[in-house]
Amino acid sequence: MKTFRIGGVHPAANKLSAGKAIEPLALPRQAVFPLSQHIGAPATPLVKKGDTVKVGTRIAEAGGFVSAPIFSSVSGKVNKIDSVIDASGYRKPAIYIDVEGDEWEPDIDRSTTLLKTCDLSPEEIVSRIKEAGIVGMGGACFPTHVKLSPPAGCKATCVIINGVECEPYLTADHRLMLEKPDEILVGICILMKAAKVNRAYIAIENNKPDAIRLLSEKAKAYAGIEVVPLQVKYPQGGEKQLIDAVIRRQVPAPPALPIHVGAIVQNVGTVFAIYEAVQKHKPLFERIVTVTGKSLKTPSNFLTRLGTPMSQLIEAAGGMPEDTGKVIGGGPMMGKALMSTDIPICKGSSGVLLMNEHEARRATPQPCIRCAKCVSVCPMGLEPYLLATCSAHGDWDRVEHEQIMSCIECGSCQFTCPSHRPILDNIRLGKGKVGAIIRARNTKK
Ligand code: SF4
Ligand code: SF4
């Protein structure tokens, strides 16, 4: 069975909510929409205090080509345009809407009828995706229409659908594959048409045999779509790792992109959003979120309106356990500790993980023993101990030379380090600095 060839680790899966069907979460009393919930320029508000909106009303327009519009997930009245602390821990401009009723924009098709036929041209599909505010829902939040607009000289030969969900604890994608397989397959056909390819691979790790079986069976009715079961290994959901695992091509170091080796990778959640946008006129304003943790009463998967505070998901899953030591936005490997549970669910919010005090405790870092375990597990072929040490010392020239910008922040190095070194923390610091240096240099040119 296939997998990627460099590095990787095997953290405990802890998929506590895998057997829990998706449930719609109740509406929040107030929904909060940060204007930056995608990579690229922040969106620009189109509403002001006192305006009335419906579910699906466009409330902010894209701030540039690499950006995405934002749509209200609720009906009600704009309370204010202010700021909110988001999952990154930074205060960002945001639109606050007080919820009144649940009135949807009339052109959204709310039926569950499967619409298979799509007569739109590739350009019309990309435009519909752009206008619906769709971004990568695996967490990267890269605007999808940009990925579907390859640079001159590049052409896709296939699309790879990421159904790997290799982060421990998270089960939203797994449930989506089990509960919406037909919509996902139609979404893939639409994506193939937009990308002008006739080949698609759905990559799923073999710890989800039910999803592999179901999609393999249903894919027989769709030309050019193949399910590719993969060995379980983290971080297989990384774009470059997935491309290597499925089609055995290596994406060169940045600024090279997957399209330079002919691949476009999209998460299953994104493909479902594409189906809804193109076939049902439904912009992106809700998503499936896993709420989980060993001490949580009912680990769950909720269909959640964007803007809902995380505290509401935790309450719906049984409430905050007394022994909670840390709340993580995302999974335990790549997720970030949250400052508050008032943070709203955004387009890239795949999960909320409540770690108990025991799990949240970090061991005291010890000196590096030069064991090279971090090097052997790094899926990008980097030298994590060196990047971390040079970052801690502010040696930005050296870390740039050592390809720090290739780090995908998977956390495999820190996970495996026997000395409990804060490797990823230091690398993130270094990436932030070097990224700013590179941007400043490019601006001067
Ligand atoms: S976090 Fe970066 S340096 Fe560490 S293993 Fe992952 S890619 Fe390599
Ligand atoms: S795994 Fe930890 S102890 Fe081993 S070389 Fe890397 S940083 Fe040093």
Image: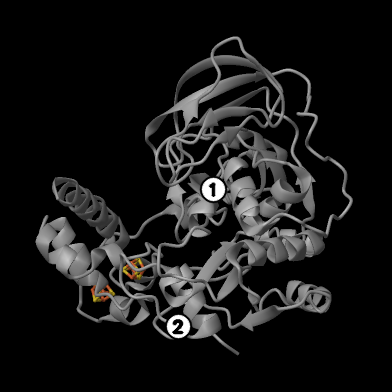
**Quarter assignment of residue 189:** bottom right
Left or right: 26 in relation to 10: right
Q: Earlier in the sequence, mark 2 or mark 1?
A: 2
Q: In this view of the protein, can residue 133 be seen by the observer? A: no
Looking at the picture, which amino acid does disc 1 mark?
Answer: Gly
Residue neighbourhood size for the residue with mark 1, other residues' Cα within 10 Å, grouped as few (<14), some (14–19), many (≥20): many
Q: Nearer the viewer, residue 126 or 353?
A: 126
Left or right: 130 in relation to 177: left
Which residue is disc 2 drawn over? 249
- The outermost residue toward the top is 50
Q: Is residue 155 above or below residue 3?
A: above
Q: Please provide percent x and percent y for residue 284.
A: 64, 42
Q: Nearer the viewer, residue 317 or 360?
A: 317
What number is the disc on residue 348?
Answer: 1
Q: Is residue 361 above or below residue 68?
A: below
Q: Where on the image, by quarter, is ligand 1?
A: bottom left
Tell me which residue sits at (26%, 51%) in the image: 432
Q: Nearer the viewer, residue 315 or 1?
A: 1
- The residues bearing labels 2 and 1 have C-alpha atoms spaced at a distance of 27 Å
